[in-house]
Image (spheres, rainbow, N blue to C red):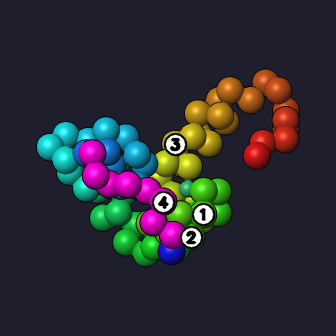
Amino acid sequence: MPRWTDPGDGSCDHCLAWANDRAKLCIGCYGWRRDHPTTADCQRCRRHLPLRADLCRFCTLVLRENETDISRAALAGGD
Ligand SMILES: [Zn+2]
Ligand SMILES: [Zn+2]
């Protein structure tokens, strides 16, 4: 697994959000990992993280936002 993520400056190791107190994971990802303890390669970002339906929390949140954005635009490719 390539370590291209840098957990050094207090950002969440999973979703890259800025967490307080140099926490390894933000509250959201901590709960996510607790609820989804099985890790694998995310189908979208390819990082090795706890997944739900083949997506990590970060990608699940991104797709959820996009889902509302494209709800009136049919299937516009995606990534
Ligand atoms: Zn996080
Ligand atoms: Zn992902």
Q: Quadrant of residue 21?
A: top left
* Distance CA(mark 3)–CA(mark 2): 17 Å
Cβ atoms under marks 2 and 1 closer than 8 Å? yes
Task: Judge whether residue 72 is colored magenta.
Answer: no
**Mark 3 Cα shell of 10 Å, populated few (<14), some (14-19), many (≥20):** few
According to the picture, the residue beneath numbered tag 4 turns out to be 4
Is the residue indicated by label 1 positioned so its CB lies within 8 Å of ligand 2? yes
User: Looking at the image, is mark 2 or mark 4 nearer the viewer?
Assistant: 4
* Distance CA(mark 4)–CA(mark 3): 21 Å
- Res 53 seen here: no
> Where does the magenta region start and end?
2-9
Check residue 61 in the rendering and tell me which mark sits there, or answer none. Answer: 3
Give the left or right position of residue 44, taking residue 8 as reference.
right
According to the picture, the residue beneath numbered tag 1 turns out to be 46
Amino acid at pointer 4: Trp
Q: Earlier in the sequence, mark 3 or mark 2?
A: 2
Give the left or right position of residue 51, taking residue 77 as reference.
left
Amino acid at pointer 1: Arg
* Distance CA(mark 4)–CA(mark 1): 12 Å
User: Looking at the image, is mark 3 or mark 2 nearer the viewer?
Assistant: 2
Element under label 3?
helix
Q: Earlier in the sequence, mark 2 or mark 1?
A: 2
Is 71 placed above or below 24 here?
above
Q: Position of residue 26 (x, y in %)?
A: 28, 47
Q: Position of residue 31 (x, y in %)?
A: 30, 55
Q: Quadrant of residue 3?
A: bottom left
* Distance CA(mark 3)–CA(mark 1): 15 Å
Amino acid at pointer 3: Leu
Is 60 placed above or below 48 here?
above
